[in-house]
Amino acid sequence: MSSAAAVEGRPLAGHTTRLPWPFPDDLDSFRYSVNVEPARVPRPTAAGEWGAHIVDLGGEEYGAMMAERRRILDADPHRVRILPGMLPACWDLLLYYLRDLAISFPHIMELSEDGDHLHWRNHALGTDQSFVLGDAASLPYDPMTFLGREIPDDLLLVKERDGRLCFDAGLVTFAAAWSVSFDVGMTMDEIHNPVPRLTKEGITSRAEQFLRRLPADQVYRRVNWTLSASGSRKLDVSLEELPAWGTDIPALVRDEEWGRLQLRIEVEHFVRLPMTGAVTFNIRTHMTSLDEIRRVPPWRDQLARVVLELPEDLATYKGFADYREPAMAWLTGEVTA
Amino acid sequence: MTSPGHLHPSYDVSPRPLMVVEVRDLTPEVRHVVLVDPHGTALTPHEPGAHLVVTTTPSGPDSGVTKRNAYSLTGDGVLPRQYAISVLRKDAPTGFGDESGGSVWMHGLEVGDVIEVEGPRSSFAPRHDQRHCLLLAGGIGVTPVLSHARAAVRWGGSVEVLYSYRPGHAAHLDDLHALAEAPGVSLRMAVTVDETLALLRDRLADQPLGTHAYACGPPALLAAYLEAGRAAGWTDERLHLERFSAPALDPGSPFSALIVSSGRRVDVAPGTSLLVALHEAGVAVPSLCRQGVCGECVVPVRSGRLEHRDLVLSDVERRAGDRMLSCVSRGAGPDELIEVDL
């Protein structure tokens, strides 16, 4: 399917053509599953393509996203939580990602190595930093924060303790109604207990088994989705910021501004870091409005089918049980603008 | 679907050629071998206590017979430029799971030789949240212990090393003495069985809260370590160990395995492992230690009662009954039929 054929009206923007559409072409009903697949495999969508690299810098949106990330980190240091003993894993993470970025985006990012001495340059953001791996004093921030100020992904590290995988370090500025300070140190079970069906149907334990056995030579990814708790592109709908977004959706529903509803898509990447055995659960969040989705008919029709078919408990958990019918009716209705 | 895995070459763990740049005798029986990438690429980082798998050809390079031998890395694993291993020469065959040929072959290596190496692989890693680290080495078991000690020093942790050896046969004792110069590091030695037992009882009874202990050495030493640790009130979750050989097993009862994909039935006689029986039936299962220690040869099981004889699976995994290590574990009882999901 060519992307042009799928489009009505104005030409699609870069944002839409890069979007990681979360559903396979033939999917009509969504249930949680261990939907992991090898990473770095480009996937065509009805509007374009995504997934060639483990980091999606976001094209023309990169600068704005990183400014927002840095603003949040400066304003609220509690968005970074590193439990005792996890600093080596944070160095492991930093080294892996800087090496990967320099190969994936050689025109804007460079890393030179001389033993433990590294030199990182990011020409898009103006970063020019020499440092010594493992020497905290050689970086302006801890290694996880340094990386988090260079790429838009939320950074999460899990590591085994007494046979359980535990979320023991994280930098999270774009959480979907959760808080890194609340969740850090929890096991996978404890974190996922609020999700209906997930733990009872054994999905959490299968996902945990998958991560525990994640092979050293492969990188995997998974796509997750919901309708955002905000009627704007705002990525930070964390519990810390609840007062700032908590009334967004009730106001949107009252005014029936369905076009502003946002499909929130999260692409997770799983890498076993070799120096420490920590596993990444990094999350890159994408947003697209129903207004944009309406312009790609295969997306429009599939999203409406999936949202309307979803059982009540899952729709309630995802937060749209109360308004999904009028919203989807607007999405698939006659365009009257 | 295939994907490129890691982009950077310094994350490769697949079998690949590495070049010997140094061989050095540490004791009359222990030879230190240092390997680098032939192209000068930085090597894959690894966890403390990790090992390499070396492809050896003890029957000669033209025999077509290869063996895979595991050797612990002695470095801290942080951005390694080289991999260093120390190999104890075992001349007399030791029976089941014999690795003597491999060690003799390793001792024949010379500077400039290129050998096939897989890994590093990690199966004896430290707990990241340990507040203190107690390490016990017996004989050649010093190799992963040295790796742990170096990593602890590198990351600013505190560590106490206990080293039990025969006088004149203490590989890496000089390296441990040098490490013990660093703040937070201490070294204690024992050269007889009685001294070792006394040292174990004494030190396991006097560690700070939050300590994790790690031991590598011969079976008798590990048994004494576990006994002394439990007697001093340690939980098994804090008593880590790596075995380099397993106790001898009895031949077991005959049983049969039904291969789900083909419907074929394979009979396993006493003294033969499921792994060998499957191999003879043309079903390839990857294996490494063939002693129930490494976990490489695990096979999924759909039905049938099992007698687990490995040292890898947890109690929970055993009770689940859905997998077994095909090198040592068997059907429970005579003529049991198990279904293997291969």
Image: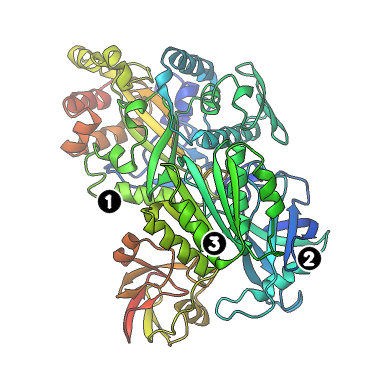
Badges 3 and 2: C-beta atoms under 8 Å apart? no
Q: Is residue B276 above or below residue B269?
A: above
Q: Nearer the viewer, mark 2 or mark 1?
A: 2
Tag 2: Cα neighbours inside 10 Å, few (<14), some, or many (≥20)?
some
Image point (70%, 45%), residue name = B178
Q: Count the marks: how many?
A: 3
Amino acid at pointer 3 = Thr
Numbered label attached to residue A314: none
User: Which quadrant would the C terminus of chain A be assigned to in this image?
Assistant: top left
Image point (28%, 15%), residue name = A245
| Along the line of sight, the residue nearer the viewer: B41 or A268 | B41
Tags 2 and 1 on a common chain: no
Q: Nearer the viewer, mark 3 or mark 2?
A: 3
| Along the line of sight, the residue nearer the viewer: B252 or A69 | B252
- How far apart marks 3 and 2 lie (CA) works out to 34 Å
Amino acid at pointer 2 = Leu
Q: Nearer the viewer, mark 1 or mark 3?
A: 3
Where residue A259 appears, x then y in whole percent? 29, 18
Numbered label attached to residue B109: 2
Tags 3 and 2 on a common chain: yes
Residue matched to label 1: A202
* Circle 3 SS class: helix
- How far apart marks 1 and 3 lie (CA) works out to 47 Å
Q: Is residue A163 visible?
A: yes
Residue matched to label 3: B196
Image point (26%, 37%), residue name = A306
Where residue A156 appears, x then y in whole percent? 44, 34
Q: For mark 3, name the chain.
A: B
Q: Is residue A328 above or below residue B322?
A: above
